[in-house]
Amino acid sequence: MSEDALDEMMQVLRAEYLAEAPARLAEMTAQLDAWEGGSVEARDKLCSLAHQVTGSAGSYGFTEASNAARQMEQLLKPHPDADAALLAVLRAALAYITAQLQPST
């Protein structure tokens, strides 16, 4: 397969990833909201989702989104309880990831 064909295939895969990103990010937001409401299970799910985004975003070349998701994961692991400051940082990280995973026009 030629380099041009590989580049074209990667562009298609990146576009598909970006098309699926809103659902993944909505799930992360829902889990963050649930954790704020007291669900410890939601924190675990959010941590898992952040881990998935760390890997997948990095694999598709979205380094900044991957780094922000990694930071979310690292912040979540040692904190079983939500507090206002941590929630604010996590929401800011999620907003940053959302901005990074917007299709370019």
Image: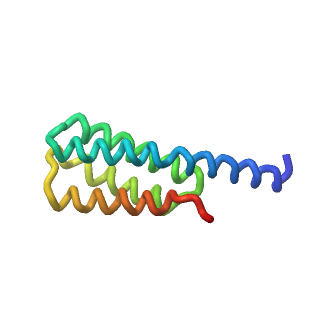
Q: Which one is in front, 60 or 26?
A: 26
Rendering coords of residue 66 (x, y %): 46, 55
Task: State the colouring used for the structure image.
Answer: rainbow
Please state if 9 lies on the left or on the right of 83 as rendered: right
* Residue at (44% x, 43% y) in the render: 24
Q: Quadrant of the C terminus?
A: bottom right
Q: Nearer the viewer, residue 62 or 16?
A: 16
| Left or right position of 32 against 105 | left
Q: Residue at x 18, y 37 (%)?
A: 39
Q: Position of residue 80 (x, y in %)?
A: 17, 44
Residue positioned most to the top: 41
Residue extending farthest bottom: 105
Q: Residue furthest front?
A: 105
Give how far across and how far down residue 104 sits, in percent. Answer: 60, 63
In the displayed structure, 40 sits above or below 6; it is above
- Decide which of 29, 76 is in the foreground and name it: 29
The residue at the point 21 percent across, 43 percent down is 35
Q: Is residue 19 left or right of residue 39?
A: right
Pick whichever, 102 or 55, lies toward us: 102
Identity of the residue drawn at 18% across and 48% down: 79
Labels in figure, total: 0
Task: Determine the image quadrant of residue 30.
Answer: top left
